[in-house]
Amino acid sequence: MLVSAKEMLTAAREGHYAVGQFNINNLEWTKAILLTAEELRSPVILGVSEGAAKYMCGFKTVAAMVSAMVESLKITVPVALHLDHGTYEGALACIEAGFSSIMFDGSHYPIEENIAKTKELIKLAEEKGISLEAEVGAIGGEEDGVVGAGECADPDECKMIADLGVTMLAAGIGNIHGKYPENWPGLSFDTLAAISEKVGMMPLVLHGGTGIPADMIKKAISLGVSKINVNTECQLAFAAATRAYVEAGKDLAGKGFDPRKLLAPGAEAIRATVKEKMELFGSVDRA
Ligand code: 13P
């Protein structure tokens, strides 16, 4: 059964560790992440962006696949299925489709509108017993080859959104999606400390987990980060392992072209990446 992310994140906030959100793209991705979480006895959040959901034939297909897989693989650790960077309409659709957690990203709206929309969704999420993540301060990233710097959220705005009763809060602290540029100045711990001071024990979410050095991850956790999102790093690991398989000519040997063989090294690489992150985040044996 899928669970809300509330309980696992409250425990993480109190226990000074973080739960990983790993984004999924297909069946192999989902299976690799679930098996790793089970092996390590770690709670886990499966993230699904609206684009990835469209690729996987819609929210309903994703919810059905994940629920069935949790049952068939006999997964016993807590698993939340979470909409990543949802629009208002996307969040409504996921609540209907059976997701156990949603993110409404209203960070691009003026704060009043972000508050109004977040408030409405909190009500609906509460009725269904699912968790809700809100965002303040847009998280940068690469768009059309231009890398935008990550914004730093206003701690007072964070407090306003936290007080609405969201489950967890994503706040920009200079983090960005995708690979970090050479000249990235690093996370703004002053901003994070100021936000943490305002919102108390609210679990904070760090997006753009790919490529953030281990010492920064640890410091962010010590300042209240309880959920860390990782996407690109699994994609890079999958692509590198698949490339190595093909470049070694293995797809040309015997039945090496069978997708169950061809995609296996990539799936193993995802498992290794997820394991490394769960160990770094401290979520192992916390299920
Ligand atoms: P990365 O792709 O940089 O790991 O970011 C993932 C993320 O924040 C998803 O919301």
Image (cartoon, rainbow, N blue to C red):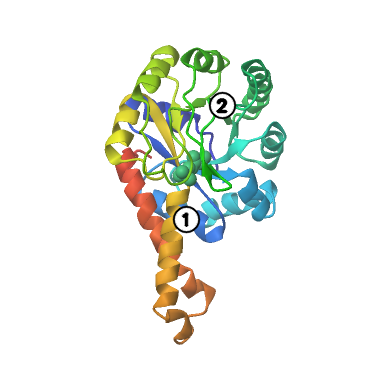
Question: Does 250 sit above or below residue 112?
Answer: below
184 to the left or right of 149? left
Indicate yes or no: mark 1 CB to ligand 1 under 8 Å.
Answer: yes
Q: Secondary structure at mark 1?
A: helix
Q: For residue 101, what is the image quadrant?
A: top right
Q: Secondary structure at mark 2?
A: strand
121 to the left or right of 170? right
**x, y percent for residue 230:** 45, 44
Question: Does 81 sit above or below residue 134?
Answer: below
In the image, 3 versus 269, the foreground residue is 269
In the image, 177 versus 9, the foreground residue is 177
Q: Marks 2 and 1, how far apart in space? A: 25 Å
* Sequence-first disc among 2 and 1: 2
Q: Quadrant of the C terminus?
A: top left
Circle 2 packing at 10 Å, graded few (<14), some (14-19), many (20+), is many
Q: Which residue position holds label 2? A: 134
Looking at the image, which residue is at 51% across and 79% down?
A: 257
Amino acid at pointer 2: Ala
In the image, 198 versus 31, the foreground residue is 198
Q: Which residue position holds label 1? A: 235
Q: For residue 227, what is the image quadrant?
A: top left
Amino acid at pointer 1: Gln
